[in-house]
Image (spheres, coloured by chain):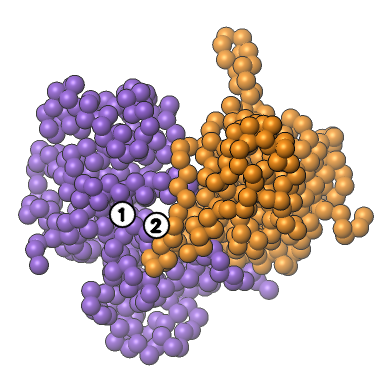
């Protein structure tokens, strides 16, 4: 096997706040191969966005990437790279598509200039060359009449259009890796469908790898080939997309899948994961999901579970891997169950 | 009053927001946010309202409560005309109709304790005071799954899901009959969303509540609603029971909307109707059928740009606004005169909706 494009090993990004040390990302490891689409799924506060920002070294104080963390990209160690060098990677070899297209664009510049700037900075193109390339790129992302649109300002475009502009900007240098952080969360469902189609299509054309970060399992199922589930700053499960949806192993993954209403499945009540995500300044010892888990037992409190191999490339951070029969005997979770009306 | 009478009845509701320009703020046009909307909500049912941003679903909810004054049309609650009510009548009405807002952060006053927030309605409507009010607040908190001790805390001390529960407790405090739920779970994480949806369901059964549930998430609406109204550009374009609507959408827009929902099952990759372009501006909506510029109906023709389709009953209890989806009251002769070349025929790619 050739070396992966991106290899993250024991990434720890901690924030030194007044309320204590928030261990937002706490020992995350994974690889992304060339041309691969990998999804990270998890709820707010699980550390998925901080992982993305760490890859681009966009962590601001009081946040810090802890020593010992390794992010290897195209053979270079990103964590210790100088400022000059990391700037050369950002937007050039790795680019990012943000969630909120309005705040990611500068309101006082024409969108064409903002897209062209990428090529002027990274490829040293002339103003004219860069502009032409930007218009070409905008057209490629399906913006009709790209020449006119390029002369407009962000507020003159709709949400879907703005997201296309960000995609054009991200793909300008044909980067090896695009990180898409909730790229469609702010969009309506029909526009979301357009944008997801576009991303998949462009990826085929350009051959870049995509790291898709989302809370939406539907988006994950439709766009990615491998999935990483994060909970409380850790990777709790990783598998190929088909395997994960067919046989989720970690109780958290299972809970997430069951708590979503599905069109065409009539159910009286939704299954819930009781309780809430613990605070990052105070992760529980042992298994971090223990309190909310219907299978937890004494081992889960005593020992922090490692990532067990549960079949092929499927790993899960759950002791059920060694005592699978416990899955047949669920019990009410330890946490005080909120959401049950006092009868 | 009989049971057959709907709890809420809305007829030809319109809301136009003026667009003003220039030094003298001359009106140069208007945004037709709600454009001739009619529907009923029966006692004890949940009417879901879905649509994309800007379709007028939130404005519809707020005009019903008169949080926004409608431009024209009729709103009747238990047979009483809401639009002609004076201040004191309206205040009394608000005890019966409540709203739960989307954003649990901005809809709770950060300077008031949770107890004070919930007690406000009790005081205004003179339902309880002193020790009785305190007891009632504790009871409400427990009912929505929070601890009674929380009443002395401030909203910022709570998570999003907990804040939404506080909003629900506030709405419940005055014992309403009808609650407009305006995107109550959109801002919440999936696991918390499920908790709040279950809570709303439990409360409905216990208190005999009627909901108007506004959301953009189609799977959430299918789960909670008995009937669903689909809105596009200020109009209701389809209205049916939730079973019928999701099984066989009759309006091309609803089809596209359903087909666009990502399915959390990698094996079920379905054919998808990708709508071209964006929603047109409600300040200048297309002529005829508002959806015609983006429509994929194979029988679409020039008549669609001329004839404004009304909400017709296509099957028992299933209404859709489309002149090309038979049966239709707009005769073929009439369509031909308007430039129609394709007779109405039932031919919508249902495969796109069901994997």
- The answer to the question of whether label 1 and label 2 lie on touching residues, with beta carbons closer than 8 A, is yes
Q: Considering the image in quadrants, where does the N terminus of chain B appear?
A: bottom right
Q: Which residue is mark 2?
A: A219
Q: Colour of chain B?
A: orange
A216, above or below A296, in the image: above
Crowd tier of the residue under label 1, counting other residues whose Cα lies within 10 Å: few below 14, some 14–19, many 20 or above: many
Mark 2: secondary structure: helix
Q: Left or right: A98 with respect to B322?
A: left
The spot of residue B142 in percent (x, y) is 64, 66
Q: Quick one: which residue is furthest to the bottom in this view?
A: A325
Q: Nearer the viewer, residue B13 or A73?
A: B13
The spot of residue B261 in percent (x, y) is 48, 55
Q: Give me the chain letter of mark 2.
A: A
Mark 1: secondary structure: strand
N-terminal-most mark, 1 or 2? 1
Q: Residue at x 27, y 54 (%)?
A: A211
Looking at the picture, do discs 1 and 2 lie on one chain?
yes
B317, above or below A98, in the image: below
Q: Nearer the viewer, residue B11 or B131?
A: B11
Crowd tier of the residue under label 2, counting other residues whose Cα lies within 10 Å: few below 14, some 14–19, many 20 or above: many
Q: Colour of chain A?
A: purple
Q: Residue at x 22, y 37 (%)?
A: A172
Kindly tell me whether residue A45 is visible in this rendering.
Answer: no
Q: Residue at x 68, y 37 (%)?
A: B335
B135, above or below B60, in the image: below
Q: Residue at x 36, y 49 (%)?
A: A197
The spot of residue B92 in percent (x, y) is 82, 44
Q: Quick one: which residue is furthest to the right in this view?
A: B1
Q: Left or right: A237 with respect to A290?
A: left
Q: Which residue is mark 1?
A: A212
């Amino acid at each position: 096997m050739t070396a992966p494009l991106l290899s993250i090993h024991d990434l720890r990004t901690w924030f030194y706040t007044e309320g204590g040390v928030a261990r937002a990302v706490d020992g995350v490891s994974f690889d992304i191969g060339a041309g691969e689409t990998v999804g990270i799924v998890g709820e707010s506060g699980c550390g998925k966005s901080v992982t993305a920002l760490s890859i681009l070294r966009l962590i601001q104080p009081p946040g810090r990437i802890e020593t010992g963390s390794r992010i290897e990209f195209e053979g270079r160690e990103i964590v210790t790279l100088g400022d000059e060098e990391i700037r050369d990677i950002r937007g050039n070899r790795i680019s990012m598509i943000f969630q909120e297209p309005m705040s990611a664009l500068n309101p006082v510049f024409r969108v064409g200039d903002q897209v062209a700037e990428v090529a002027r900075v990274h490829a040293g193109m002339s103003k004219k060359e860069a502009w032409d390339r930007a218009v070409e790129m905008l057209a490629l992302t399906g913006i009709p009449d790209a020449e006119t649109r390029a002369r407009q300002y962000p507020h003159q475009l709709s949400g879907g259009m703005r997201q296309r502009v960000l995609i054009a900007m991200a793909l300008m240098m044909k980067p090896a890796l695009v990180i898409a952080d909730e790229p469609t969360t702010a969009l309506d469902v029909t526009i979301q469908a357009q944008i997801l189609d576009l991303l998949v299509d462009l990826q085929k054309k350009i051959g870049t790898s995509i790291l898709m970060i989302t809370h939406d399992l539907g988006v994950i199922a439709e766009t990615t080939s491998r999935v990483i589930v994060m909970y409380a700053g850790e990777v709790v499960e990783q598998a190929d997309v088909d395997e994960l949806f067919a046989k989720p192993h970690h109780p958290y993954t299972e809970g997430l899948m069951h708590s979503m209403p599905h069109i065409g499945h009539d159910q009286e009540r939704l299954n819930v994961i009781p309780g809430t995500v613990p605070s990052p300044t105070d992760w529980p010892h042992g298994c971090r999901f223990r309190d909310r888990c219907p299978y937890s037992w004494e081992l889960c409190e005593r020992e922090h579970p490692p990532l067990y191999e549960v079949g092929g490339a499927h790993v899960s951070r759950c002791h059920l891997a060694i005592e699978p029969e416990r899955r047949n005997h669920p019990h009410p979770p330890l946490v005080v169950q909120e959401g049950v009306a006092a009868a | 009053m009989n049971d057959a009478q709907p709890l809420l009845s809305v007829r030809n509701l319109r809301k136009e927001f003026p667009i003003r320009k220039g030094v003298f703020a001359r009106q140069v046009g208007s945004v037709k946010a709600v454009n001739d909307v009619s529907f009923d909500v029966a006692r004890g049912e949940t009417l879901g309202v879905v649509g994309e941003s800007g379709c007028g679903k939130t404005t519809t909810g707020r005009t019903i409560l008169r949080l926004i004054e409608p431009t024209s049309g009729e709103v009747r609650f238990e047979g009483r005309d809401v639009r002609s009510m004076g201040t004191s009548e309206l205040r009394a009405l608000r005890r019966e109709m409540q709203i739960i807002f989307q954003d649990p952060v901005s809809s709770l006053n950060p300077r008031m304790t949770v107890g004070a927030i919930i007690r406000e309605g009790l005081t205004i409507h003179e339902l309880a005071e002193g020790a009785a009010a305190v007891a009632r607040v504790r009871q409400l908190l427990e009912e929505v799954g929070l601890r009674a001790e929380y009443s002395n805390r401030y909203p910022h001390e709570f998570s999003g899901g907990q804040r939404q529960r506080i909003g629900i407790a506030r709405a419940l405090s005055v014992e309403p009959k009808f609650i407009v739920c305006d995107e109550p779970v959109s801002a919440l994480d999936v696991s918390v969303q499920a908790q709040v949806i279950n809570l709303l369901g439990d409360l409905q059964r216990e208190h005999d509540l009627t909901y108007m549930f506004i959301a953009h998430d189609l799977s959430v609406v299918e789960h909670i609603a008995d009937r669903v109204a689909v809105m596009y550009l200020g109009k209701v374009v389809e209205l049916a029971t939730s079973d019928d609507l999701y099984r066989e959408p009759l309006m091309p827009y609803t089809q596209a909307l359903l087909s666009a929902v990502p399915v959390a099952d990698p094996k079920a990759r379905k054919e998808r109707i990708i709508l071209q372009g964006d929603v047109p501006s409600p300040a200048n909506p297309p002529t005829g059928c508002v959806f015609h510029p983006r429509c994929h109906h194979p029988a679409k023709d020039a008549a669609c740009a001329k004839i404004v389709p009304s909400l017709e009953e296509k099957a028992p209890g299933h209404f859709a606004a489309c002149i090309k989806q038979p049966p239709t009251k707009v005769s073929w002769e009439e369509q031909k005169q308007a430039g129609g070349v394709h007779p109405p025929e039932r031919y919508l790619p249902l495969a796109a909706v069901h994997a």
